[in-house]
Amino acid sequence: MLTKGQHDLIRYICIPWNGHYINMKRRSQVGLIHTLHLALLRKLGLQCKFQSGRRPTAPLGSRILSDPSKVYEHNMWDHIQWTSEQEELARQKAEENSSIKVSMEDQVQYDKDASVYWDKFYRAHQNKFFKDRRWLFQEFPELFPNRAFDGNEGVEESTQNSASLGQAKLDCFNKTCDKQNIADTVQKENPVKQTKSGKNLEYMKQDKRRTDMWKNPEYFPGIDFNFRIFEVGCGAGNSVFPVLDEICDPRPFLYCCDFSECAVELVKSHPSYNPTRCYAFVHDLCNEAGATYPFPDGSIDIILLVFVLSSIHPKRMQNVVNRLSKLLKPGGMILFRDYGRYDMTQLRLKKGRCLFGNFYVRGDGTCVYFFTKEEISNIFISAGLKEVQNLMDRRLQVNRKKRIAMHRVWVQCKYLKPSVNYLR
């Protein structure tokens, strides 16, 4: 409810919008008043017809362009079908842009200094370049174990078994929570004694138990959690913090890594970073010889691999996925999304940026590859994973102000680690 003062302030600001109160001399003030009006509504948490924070009424994936004359009515159209002519024109454009290759000497340098270029990227842009990926929860419901695989048609028996396993983990988690709630109630009803220094005796015992656990060679961060997510290539945390905020049933422990030290520091310095639920660390996926993970193999439920594999040299991609598959529990899954062949980004690259094939270097020195479904399928199946989803997501992104329509192409996949019985 608004106070009387707030009602009066809104009325005061809105009065000049009535036509008979505005004369020719005061029309220059209209823009300022309009801005103040919007700012006040936002501050008070109100909505108006021209300012709304709600999601669009049409769910993601259902906005189909059936009438080309209405292309500029929305910012994005889903499930765009390309004609054979469009596909051929895109192929020709990609070939034209790839006609001039980067010299071998420079290719070696870009490969060697990949982490340096990404460090420069994050130092320049901090956490302001990418938007938070809240679309993850619509595209990847597997992030919610209690409703994993809902709506995924054609999922086979092994996937259904994994969903059952996820439900069992949830039941176990709920029992643990019940025990914790009982313990909290008992603690409230029976206040514990305090030491002379004012420290809670029970807390001191808990600290000692934690210290003993850390001394245990089998201990690792997140060992007490039943559901563990690992994001590879976390950047500034645009997936990390939405996941931590959104998923609470059960509460996951989230590991995240990047080979840019600057990116990892951005995650750790974020006000929402909580070391009791998250562990961020620097890791180079392409240098597995001397690198180790802060958790054992077979301990991860979900691996997020979103717009990361494309930045890795194609000759190293298979080894990277092979190693990641070992981190998954049986029934665990890799959720993948990356650039597809002939995406707008590829067709806009200038001549002289092609390293080889469909692998390019951007102006800032970071690299990018553009995949086909078949390439992704070969990589993940060769790593011993079972294909659950592999689709080419084609959309039409519209700039209504400039009257420009741009074709976006992404590959989205889900790959399951089968049980031991399946492997046999």
Image (cartoon, helix red, strand yellow):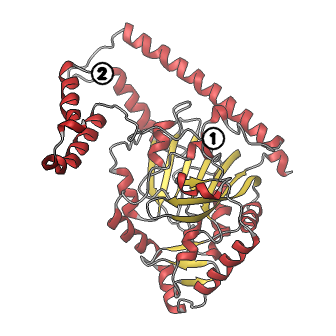
Q: Which residue is drawn at 43% across and 12% down?
A: 185
Q: Is mark 2 on a helix, strand or loop?
A: loop
Q: How far apart are marks 2 and 1 (CA)?
A: 41 Å
Q: Which mark is residue 200?
A: 2
Q: In this view, does 379 lie to the left or right of 51?
A: right
Q: Nearer the viewer, residue 263 or 290?
A: 263
Q: In which quarter of the image is residue 117?
A: bottom left
Q: Residue 82 carries which label?
A: none
In this view, the residue farthest toward the top is: 189
Q: Mark 1 points at which residue?
A: 141
The amino acid sitting under disc 2 is: Asn
Within 10 Å of the Cα at label 1, are there few (<14), some (14-19), or many (20+) other Cα atoms? some
Task: Indicate the position of residue 245 as horizontal and vertical percent values.
Answer: 45, 38
In this view, the residue farthest toward the left is: 25
Q: Residue at x 66, y 62 (%)?
A: 321
Task: Indicate the position of residue 98 as horizontal and vertical percent values.
Answer: 60, 85
Above or below for 49 versus 372? above
Q: Which residue is drawn at 23% across and 24% down?
A: 7
Within 10 Å of the Cα at label 2, are there few (<14), some (14-19), or many (20+) other Cα atoms? some
Q: In this view, does 81 lie to the left or right of 214?
A: right
Task: Indicate the position of residue 291 as horizontal and vertical percent values.
Answer: 52, 64
The amino acid sitting under disc 1 is: Pro
Q: Residue at x 55, y 44 (%)?
A: 218
Tell me if I can see residue 216 in this picture. no
